[in-house]
Image: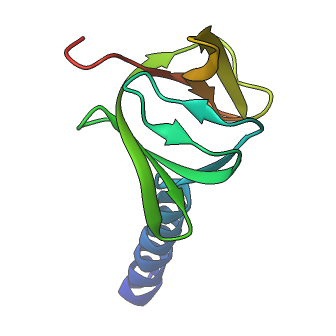
Amino acid sequence: MSRHIIKMTLYLGAAVLLTTALAMAQKAKTIEIYTDAVLPNGQELKAGKYNVAVDEAAKQVTFMQGKKTVATHPCKVVEVPTKNDCNQVRYTEKEKKQQVEELRFGGERRSILLIQEGM
């Protein structure tokens, strides 16, 4: 093979890897809160659609509507054995309010647990 063909093959391979890496990069996920709810620290979330960004390094989840940050909260990411079927929010009732406890995103093998400060 000529050097030109080898170089072109390497460039194409690098381009494919870069494109794949960009496509798999963590993006904010969309989740719908169907009823007014609160986070474990008391922050309120009104019913509606939210973009959710999970920063695993900082152990923090951010809820946004458009470009506006509505709430942030500490979280713990837990691997689950099977992929989640769809986006889900798990609630518990606390003081007659729905409290968001867990977020699951369809197609992922992780669960985002909203934890109390200092845990």
Numbered label tally: 0
Q: Position of residue 20 (x, y in %)?
A: 54, 60
Q: Nearer the viewer, residue 106 or 63?
A: 63
Q: Position of residue 114 (x, y in %)?
A: 44, 22
| Outermost residue, bottom side | 4
**Residue at (46% x, 66% y) in the render:** 68
Q: Nearer the viewer, residue 38 or 12?
A: 38
Q: Quadrant of the C terminus?
A: top left
Instruction: Work out whether residue 79 can be spotted.
Output: yes
Instruction: Work out whether residue 109 can be spotted.
Output: no
Look at the picture and state if 57 lies above or below 67.
above
Look at the picture and state if 92 lies above or below 13.
above
Q: Position of residue 42 (x, y in %)?
A: 42, 28
| Outermost residue, left side | 118
Residue 85's quadrant in the figure? top right
**Residue at (50% x, 16% y) in the render:** 79
Q: Position of residue 50 (x, y in %)?
A: 61, 52
The type of colouring in the image is rainbow
Q: Nearer the viewer, residue 73 or 76?
A: 73
**Residue at (61% x, 31% y) in the render:** 37
Q: Is residue 118 left or right of residue 37?
A: left
Q: Nearer the viewer, residue 37 or 67?
A: 37
